[in-house]
Structures are given as structure tokens and as C-alpha cells.
Amino acid sequence: MTGSTANNIRLGVMAGDGIGHEIVPATQNVVAEALNAAGAAVEWVSLPLGRDAIETDGTPIPDSTLEALDGLEGWVLGPHDSASYPDEFRGQLTPGGVIRKRFDLFANIRPARALEGVSATVPGMDLVVVRENTEGLYADRNMFVGSGEFMPTPDVAIAVGVVTRRACERIAHSAFALARTRNKHVTIVHKANVLSMSTGLFRDVCREVGEQYPDVRVDDEHVDAMTALLVRRGADFDVIVTENMFGDILSDLTAELSGSLGTAPSVNASETRVMAQAAHGAAPDIAGHNRANPTALFLSAAMMLDWIAEKRDAHVFAEAARRITNAVERTIASGVATADLGGLASTSEFTEMVLARTTRR
């Protein structure tokens, strides 16, 4: 499928918009350096997406880009600023949404870990939000054709929420399998006291799947109570599995509680493909000023390499991921950080420090 050999890999890369043109090339350099240090190599397949693609191809997500992604197992997606696109594109799926839907990237994995050198509301936090990424109340994801949100009259708006056993089962398996590699604790988050059939189905199916993982401790919380618990004792949680909208909200909360959205990595994955995509946006106000924080995308790329290492059973990619993660953490711990974290380093200066550390054991 990929044309990659055992220790070499082809990866797609889409710069996107705004600060994407700074943090994506920086990420390419860090990934290439880490893979080289681990004994592997990467060939980047650059693909148009976003405002640049509108200018060259007349659409923010060209068919040629999607067709190229068909032949790759992993890719890096920079942030997109779809709110600034011409009016004709604003009512359409975002570029990231088109990719998620086409490749059925059903698992959105968002770690939240307090880093040394970053001020955190919950200093001991080290958890992962596992978010179902294809259903729920999100109008751009829950229908095969058309939108799950509509207005039968100008004064009435209706949103359709979708929860299926199949989607619940596969995201639950992702969460429990991940928990086995961590502290073996899964918390199911739902709102079954009010949405008894929809999120009740999610809770019950997750519990059923949990019975197949007897070594993993399982509990559950209502989403409103969970927000308070994360603030009060967020260090007590390990893997949180939840539906789409709850996962979106909780992962932004945990990112801030653990330090900053600028340090929060994320991947979107199916059984066969993975996309590294930082949780933050395109930050057009600082684009082009060499001030953006590339940490989240660096760590997202490391997650992508870990995913590929597991699928291929290839230690070399896990080693490269470890080098990236360690280099980022050591750089920040040393006091080198971008302005959003209270530091003085530019994007390029921070990247150079991370690059230097990827070659060290």
C-alpha cells in the first residue's frame, strides 16, 4: 500500500494555513532527523491543502491530494483556517473533515500530560482522551449524505445525534488496548442520566467490551461531573473514552489543565491509516512572525510514528518517536520555550534545540 521498505517510509504532508507554513516544515525536519538517528529514512509527499490549494486547484481539498493519501499509511496535517476561505467554501466540510470522513479515521487520540517547565493547573496529569470521531451530534460527521443539522422553519433548528453499536465497540477496543500499555484504567464518560438511549448505549457497549479486558479497571462518570473531577483530581485518571462532542470538549479542558493547548498532541486513526494533527488552530494573527509553538505538532508526529511502529511491528519507528518526545521534553525542561509558554525562543530557535537533542540517547 505504501511503497515503503522495512526501515524507510513515505509520509504525506500538508502545510495547511496560517502557522502551518512554519510548524509543518519544522516538524518534517525533526521527524527526518529522528528517523535518521534511529536508522531509518523518510520520503515526504507534499500535497496541496487549504488556501494555497484554493489558489492552485480551485478547492481547499483537491481530489489529487485525496488520491495521493490513498497510497500512504500516515501523514501530517497542518492547521487550516477554513473560516477565512471564500464564502463558497464556508458551508462545506473542512479539509480535515473531508479527510477524516473519506478514510474513516474513527479514533481521535488526545494525550494530556504535564511537562516539566510548563506551568500546569494539574501538575501530575498524565491521561489520554480517546474520542469517537465519526458520530454523535456533529453535523459534519453523522450523515452519509447531507448534514445532521437542519432548520425546518427559520425559527426552529434541529440536530440529529447518532450512536451505533459498531462505532462504540471499535472506539472502546481502542481505549482498552491503549490502557493495557499504560496504567490499566479506563473511565467511560457519558450522560446516560439524561440521554439514556444514545449515551446509555455508548456506556453499555463500552462496559461490554471492557469485559474482554479483565486486567483493566473500568469505571464511568457523567460528563458534567467529569469536568469537575478533572479540575479537582485530574492526576487520578488514565484513559478516558467518550463520544464525539464530549471528547472534543474534555480534551481541550485536559490540554489546558496539563499546561497549554500549544503542547497538546493528537492523532486521528483508523485500523490502517493515521494522521498527525495538533489540536490547536492556524493562529493567523501570528502567522509569518516566527513565534508559533511547534510542540503539539512535534508530539503528534511522534504519536504517528508510534502508531506505525505498532502496526508494522518495527522498533525503528518507535525509537524515532521516543527521540522526538524526549528531545521536546528536555528542551522545554531546560527553559527553552516559545512565547506562549512564557519563553523567549522563536519557532526556528526552539526547533533547532529540539533537532540537536534528537541525535542524543
Image (cartoon, rainbow, N blue to C red):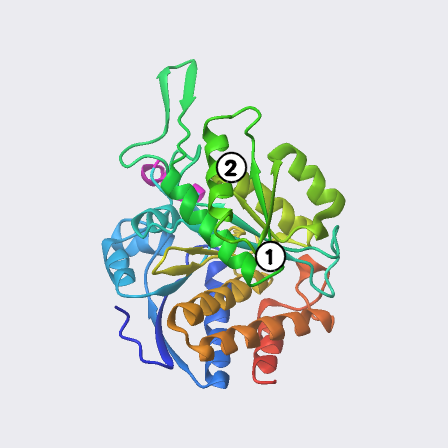
- Quadrant assignment, res 141: top left
Can you give x and y, in whole percent of width and height, for residue 74 in the image?
A: 37, 65
Secondary-structure class at tag 2: helix
> How many other residues sit within 10 Å of disc 1, few (<14), some (14-19) or many (≥20)?
some
Q: Residue 89 magenta-drawn?
A: yes
Q: Mark 1 points at which residue?
A: 184
Is 1 placed left or right of 268 in the picture? left
Q: In this view, does 102 lie above or below 44?
A: above
Q: In this view, does 113 lie above or below 135?
A: below
Is 284 placed left or right of 135 in the picture? right
In this rendering, does residue 287 appear at all?
no
In this rendering, does residue 270 appear at all?
yes
Can you give x and y, in whole percent of width and height, for residue 259 in the image?
A: 69, 55
Can you give x and y, in whole percent of width and height, for residue 97 in the image?
A: 37, 46
Residue positioned 71% across, 64% down in the render: 343
Q: What are the residue bounds of the magenta stretch?
A: 83-91
Q: Tag 2: residue type?
A: Arg
Residue 203: image tag? 2
Nearer-the-camera pick, 152 or 290: 152
Q: Is residue 314 above or below residue 271?
A: below
